[in-house]
Image (cartoon, rainbow, N blue to C red):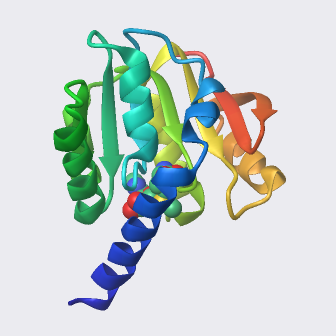
Amino acid sequence: MHENNFTVETMISMLEQRDITAPINEECNKFNIKTGDIVIDYGCGSGGYTKKISELLGENGKVYAVDIHELAIESVKKKINKYQLTNVETVLVKNINEIRDTASDVIIAIDMFHMVQDKNVFLKELYRLIKKDGTLFISTHHMTSEEVERIILDSKLWTIQCEIDNCLKCIPLLK
Ligand SMILES: C[S@@+](CC[C@H](N)C(=O)[O-])C[C@H]1O[C@@H](n2cnc3c(N)ncnc32)[C@H](O)[C@@H]1O
């Protein structure tokens, strides 16, 4: 097996274990998700958040579970089958253009911003995907809040409304 694949496989298997015990349900409360919303779980990993959000949205809503790695997408697909998550669609980052402009009410990017190579390009892509009255939650895992805040504000595309736990709640500047 390729070394990089091994690392990703380890990460996904650790996330799958974490999904069993982590307080994801409570954590999702802060995203203020409403029935029927369109949500993007960007950097979805094993889909722990995707599953809970899928349940909150009901059948008229939709979650796009997006990840850069095939193994993450495969793990989410297993959850879709196991729990019959009919409102979840998986998208590999290389196919991100399948999601149309301004498609989403809420985007979450949890424990992944530190991994993103070009953070400006990433923030621009999220800006493309959000509705003008939509909300973005970026967690500050493995970085300081100040570092993440500076990058977001420097993009000149987003403003920060507040920090809830370890998440920055951002809204898009004029669209
Ligand atoms: C530590 S995991 C967190 C997964 C999930 N958000 C959670 O908290 O359970 C980080 C995930 O982000 C993905 N990732 C890293 N860089 C990415 C990028 N540029 N675009 C999309 N996904 C990315 C990784 O493949 C991995 O699945």
As drawn, 32 above or below 70: above
| Residue depicted at x 76% and y 45% | 149
Q: Is residue 171 above or below residue 72?
A: above
- Asked if residue 129 shows in the view, the reply is no
Quadrant where the N terminus sits is bottom left
Observer-nearest of 124 and 90: 90
Is 43 positioned to the left or the right of 32 in the image? Answer: left
Residue 88 x, y percent position in the rendering? 25, 31
Q: Is residue 102 left or right of residue 84?
A: right
Residue at 28% x, 80% y: name it.
Answer: 5
Q: Residue lying furthest right in this view?
A: 146
Q: Position of residue 83 (x, y in %)?
A: 25, 36
The answer to whether 86 appears left or right of 163 in the picture is: left
Lateral position of residue 38 relative to residue 73, left or right: right
Query: Which residue is pictured at 38% across the width and 24% down the height?
Result: 55
**In the image, ligand 1 is in what quadrant?**
bottom left
In the image, residue 168 lies at what x, y percent?
71, 37
Residue 45 lies in what quarter of the image? bottom left
| Count of picture labels | 0
> x, y percentage for residue 63?
33, 29
Name the foreground residue: 119 vs 90.
90
> Which residue is nearer to you in this view: 148 or 43?
43
**Residue shown at the point (32%, 15%) measured from the top left:** 61
Tell which of 57 and 145 is nearer to you. Answer: 57
The furthest residue to the left: 81
* Placement of 57 over or under 147, stated as above or below: above
Q: Is residue 54 visible?
A: yes
Quarter location, residue 164: top right
